[in-house]
Image: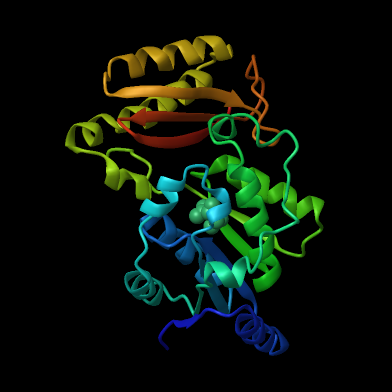
Amino acid sequence: MATECIAAIAALRERVSRAKLAGLRVGCVPTMGALHAGHTALFDRARPDCDLLVATLFVNPLQFDRQDDLRKYPRDLESDLQICDRHGVDVVFAPSQDEMYPRPPVMTVEIEGLADGLCGASRPGHFLGVATVVMKLLNIVQPDFACFGEKDYQQLVIVRRIVEDANLPVRIVGVETVREPDGLAISSRNAHLNADERASAPALARSLRAARQAIQQGESCAAVLRDNAGAVLDREPLIRLDYFEIVDPDTLKPVERVTGPVRIAAAAFLGKTRLIDNVLATPS
Ligand code: PAF
């Protein structure tokens, strides 16, 4: 059956509650559209575990710190619907801005601690926007579980915490980052890279892999790991590092010594394009 597209909250709720009354399991993949292999990996992860798979497609104005980014964000509902159809999505929930925010919200979701570092440091208000819309989407769809990509690791940790703090009855599933053959994490922003920037971009993933390998081989000093990564990235003149951090995977607090599993997270600019990536590392 072809993917059904629903724009109204009431109609979506109706569709999901019918499924739940029939005892069906509901899975959800929240997206902002402009779907690529990173999103289809989320659909493919969710599909076997649910009877009704709902993808949400909503470009959330609240999470854009720059208005030109919001304006430039690619929107192609027809093509997204075809991709959803090919990956077995049953329902696409694609509300308008008025449907989601009929008036400016008086309730937003503030995040203590988790939103200040890493990407939060250079994108003020971004995670407040993400947390607020995710809370609304989970409340509208009320799925049994929802999938989020590990590429946006800070987002994934924040979503897990708001679900825990608000006692939402939904399981959050993290899905491994999908990469190009040369290691570059797949992102809609990769399309903004020119040929030279694209050729340099995999160095970001290389620097993370090198740090992970050093940790596995016994290096535990975060400052040394950061310096080594700086040296790898200095060889790429087109890359301007924003941050390279070794953090606790749950609290996102930077660690000075690696004594257990850590997330190594980095962001870098290539021209005007900001790319992010991260890996898990565990000392042997
Ligand atoms: O990761 C995204 O695409 C967005 O941040 C999300 C989770 C759909 C919220 O708008």
Q: Residue at x 30, y 32 (%)?
A: 201
Residue 22 percent coordinates (x, y): 68, 90
Q: How many marks?
A: 0
Residue 224 percent coordinates (x, y): 51, 9
Q: How is the image coloured?
A: rainbow
Q: Is residue 259 above or below residue 13?
A: above
Q: Is residue 192 above or below residue 76?
A: above
Residue 238 percent coordinates (x, y): 27, 23
Q: Residue at x 43, y 59 (%)?
A: 39
* Visible residue check, residue 203: yes
* Visible residue check, residue 284: no
Q: Is residue 70 left or right of residue 281?
A: left
Front one among 220 and 237: 237
Q: Is residue 8 left or right of residue 181?
A: right
Q: Is residue 42 above or below residue 72?
A: below
Image quadrant where residue 168 sits: bottom right
Front one among 11 and 104: 104
Q: Is residue 20 left or right of residue 205?
A: right
Q: Residue furthest front?
A: 103
Q: Is residue 181 above or below residue 168?
A: above
Q: Residue at x 22, y 33 (%)?
A: 199
Front one among 39 and 176: 39
Residue 45 percent coordinates (x, y): 50, 62
- Quarter placement of the N terminus: bottom left
Image quadrant where residue 24 sits: bottom right
- Quarter placement of the C terminus: top right
Q: Residue furthest left?
A: 195
Q: Residue at x 72, y 42 (%)?
A: 111
